[in-house]
Each structure stands twice: as C-alpha cells, then as structure tokens.
Image (cartoon, rainbow, N blue to C red):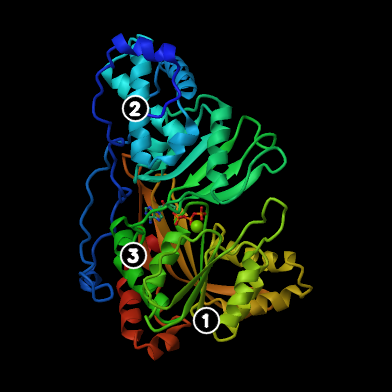
Amino acid sequence: MFGKRSAGADSQRADARPAPVAPAPKPAARANDLPHPAARPQASAFSELKLNGDAPMASPPIAPEPAPVFAETRRSESFYETKGQIFSALIEAIDLTQLSKLDPLAAREEIRDIVNEIVAIKNVAMSISDQEDLLEDICNDVLGYGPLEPLLARDDIADIMVNGADTVYIEVQGKIQKTGVRFRDNQQLHNICQRIVSQIGRRVDEASPICDARLPDGSRVNVIVPPLSIDGPALTIRKFKKDKLTLEQLVRFATVSPEGAQLLQVIGRCRVNTLISGGTGSGKTTLLNCLTRYIDHDERVITCEDAAELQLQQPHVVRLETRPPNLEGEGEVKMRDLVRNCLRMRPERIIVGEVRGPEAFDLLQAMNTGHDGSMGTLHANSPREALSRLESMITMGGYQLPSRTIREMIVASIDVIVQVARLRDGTRRITHVTEVVGMEGDVITTQDLFVYDFLGEDAGGKIIGRHRSTGIGHPRFWERARYFGEEQRLAAALDAAEVIDETLRA
Ligand SMILES: Nc1ncnc2c1ncn2[C@@H]1O[C@H](COP(=O)(O)OP(=O)(O)OP(=O)(O)O)[C@@H](O)[C@H]1O
Ligand SMILES: [Mg+2]
C-alpha cells in the first residue's frame, strides 16, 4: 500500500479490526429503459404493412405498465456528517498523486481498504448497508463524479439537472422528478463541474462561468456557475443513449402511428428536405436519427452537430462537430463554419443537428443547390413558428435581404416540417407532418399531411389521441416518391391513415 498514513494511525490500526465489508452495491435498480407508451392508436388494415421490410408493424405489443419510478432516498444528516469526517481523514491518509496512477479498479480497492480502516479506528457506529453506501459515495467522490455517479449509471434517465448542491432533478419516462441526491456543498459540486469541463481543456470560474462539455460516454453537459447562477453551480446533463430509439420503437410508444412511420420512411428515403421542429427534449434529435436510417447506403452524408449525438448507420458518413473557444477565447468553430465547409466536401445530403443561428441560411442554400434530402432540427412549437424562426435566424444573421426574398428561399428549400411535442403526461408525439407549399402574396402557405388529434385524457392522466392523415392524397413530393419507386407506399400510408369519422375532424 502506498498510503501516507501516519505512524499513529498505523499503530492504532494494529488492534483495530476492519469492519466487515459487504459486496459493492449494484447501481440502483433500473426502471424500464424506455418510456411507457400511452394509449396506442387502433390497429388498422394498414397495420399489416411492413416497415422497410422489417418485422410487420401490425399490432405493436402493448408495453407493460411503467415500473414504479425510482427516486433516491435522502440520507440522514448524521450520514453526511460522518461521511464528511471520514472523507477528511481519507484525504489526510492517502496520496492522491499515487492514487491517480492506479487503474480505477485498483484505486477503488485501495480507497475501500483505507476507509474501512478509518471506520474501524474511529469506531463509527453504522449499519453495514450505510457503510457500503458510504464507501461507494467516497469512491465516487474521489475517483468519479461524486453523487452523480449512481444517476449516470442508470440507463432509464434522460436528463440530470443539478440546481445547486441540494437539489437534483432527473427526467425518467418523460417526467421530471426530484431526487434525494445532494452534494456535500457547492464547493464539491463546483469541483465536479470543474472535473467534467477539464476533460475538454476548459475551466469554469467567475471569469468564464459558462461551459458546454461532454462526458466520456458522449453525454452532453452544460455548466453555469456563480455569479451567473445565483444558488450555486447549475449542471445539466443530457444522457447519451447508446441504443438510439428506432421508428419501430416510436410506433410502439405511440409517438407516431404505423402509417405515420411509413410516411416518415418515405420522406427519409426520397430525399425530401426536412426540418424537425419541437420544444426542448421533445425528441427532435431522436427523430432525426430515425429518419437517417432510411437514407440509401450509397449516399455521401455529412453531419454537423454541436455535440455528436446522431448515429448514422450508413457507411459513407463524415461527422463534424463545432468547437467552443479555448481559454483565451480563440479557436471557436461555429455551426455556420461547418455547414459552409460541408459544401466543399461534395456532400449529397447535409444533416445539421440543430439549426439555431445564421447557419440556417447556408442550410437553405444547400437544400436549394442540389443537396436534396438535407435535414435539420429547430426549436419551435408549431410548423408555422418553425418557418418564422427560420426567417428570423436569417435576418439576425445580418443578411440584408427583404423578408419576401427570405420567404421565397424558404419555400424553395424546405419541403416538409415534422413537428414533435412532449405532452404533459411525459409521452412524445409527432403532432404534424406539414408540407411547405408555396406563397400567397407575402405569406408562406403550408398544408398538413398528417396530424395528431387530442381526444382527451384517461383516468390515469394519460393523454388519448389519434394520428390521422388529412385526406391529401398527392403531397407535393409525390413526383419525388415516384422517382424513388415509393409512390405506392406513400399512397397506402396516407390512405390508411385517413379517419372516416367526421366528428373527429370537427
Ligand atoms: N418518442 C420518444 N419516446 C420516448 N422517449 C423519447 C422519444 N424521443 C426521444 N426520447 C427521449 O427523450 C430524450 C430527449 O430526446 P432528444 O435528445 O431527441 O430531444 P431533443 O428534442 O433533441 O432535445 P434538445 O432540445 O435538448 O436537443 C432522450 O433521452 C430520448 O431517448
Ligand atoms: Mg437535440
């Protein structure tokens, strides 16, 4: 052992029996990995059709009731007090530089040994399970991201939101809930934030209080510290899911009906220029990822993202990522730079993770100049709002173009807007598939192809609704679908999604 423990501590150790140590606790029991589907739309004759030749989409199995939502139990004050004392003794006893040279498992073992000794020496009265929790917590504090570790280990969590040392929220199954997790104090939280951002060579402090970073597993992190965040550091983590949801799964969760999924497949395959619009965490990136699955394998695709989240299955993909400025404020590469550069890389399609600034102009130009089938996501609450956001992004980017010209450019570029929403029961729904049709005077005209009707709420608070097509048999991209040999599938999907009951349309 390499600990720098004092002789005194060693001599006390001779007659002190290390407390028995139970095996390390497994990460907290996981709730269902995937959110619970809400009321499933009724199966139709169409449901016999297959999704891209995969398993039939008919009668998606009804998922089990959601597992009880797991919430961390808040531990007693005395637990935290004891942990503080043991932690201080450990820091005294251990040589952190030596520890950092060990591999994580060996370092963990080393810490466990020393903590057990300290517990024995200090004669701490504690149940075995508390002692195990304490060991785990201390190992996490020294080697990992402290109290965040158990949350990071869970696959069912979509977001972790830390609002200062005492308040941690998580999103599970589409619902935000408070956990009992807390940090020793804001300093510990700040240190953990620092540890996270240092991995990308950044620092957060008063001088530079905002930072975007990524965890080694790809999770997206935003840190904002005092004085900008008033009640201590605020840390937001979008957990990276290795197994991205597929369109089949979205059908199972009733995010979209089987017919709607067919429509989206046709859109994905037939090089329709598509914008995915939705609120924060509504599932835009997830849906974009689903659509990219239907891109033909011989197309050259270039993706531009702030943090690489997309997982394209195609062989010919170039992935690009923006770069924040370094500590001296230099070296920033913005989304706009990437999209512009993309155009010189002979792309067939360009996929922009999130359009939020002047790159909107370059994406539209790309869509307009032979890069059909380009796609992007955008933050807006309706297809119409998506169009006006697009326009204002271009205006704010400093282009001195008359608004009519910008609108004409939008009409010439965007074919379809797919709107996603996170409903108040936590489920996600595709609420519109809307075509951009043309201009009437100065106004862009659109037509909905496929919509979601809200019908009510069941006794358990789940929203009931139904997807339907609007009766438009020949969308504007019909010719394109014909060119790709997909017109039968398109027609069948739209036909089958039609709702006969007129009262629903009222
Ligand atoms: N249809 C869905 N059903 C259930 N969960 C979903 C669905 N779509 C997305 N999710 C989950 O919701 C979380 C957020 O999804 P996603 O990152 O796609 O949202 P987003 O709209 O791109 O968010 P942001 O605005 O932060 O970029 C992820 O954990 C994802 O797995
Ligand atoms: Mg996103």
Q: Residues within 10 Å of mark 3 (few under 14, many from 20)?
A: many
The answer to whether residue 132 is left or right of residue 365 is left
Looking at the image, which residue is at 55% across and 73% down? 446
Q: Is residue 72 visible?
A: no
Earlier sequence position, callout 2 versus callout 1: 2
Foreground label between 3 and 1 = 1
User: What's the residue type where badge 1 is placed?
Assistant: Pro
The residue where tag 1 is placed is: 347
User: What's the residue type where badge 3 is placed?
Assistant: Leu
Q: Nearer the viewer, residue 463 or 219?
A: 219
x, y percentage for residue 478?
43, 85
SS at badge 1: loop
The residue where tag 2 is placed is: 112
x, y percentage for residue 87?
45, 22
> Vertical placement of 119 versus 284: above or below?
above
Find out whether the residues at labels 3 and 2 contact each other: C-beta distance under 8 Å.
Answer: no
SS at badge 2: helix
Dot 3 beta carbon under 8 Å from ligand 1: no
Earlier sequence position, callout 3 versus callout 2: 2
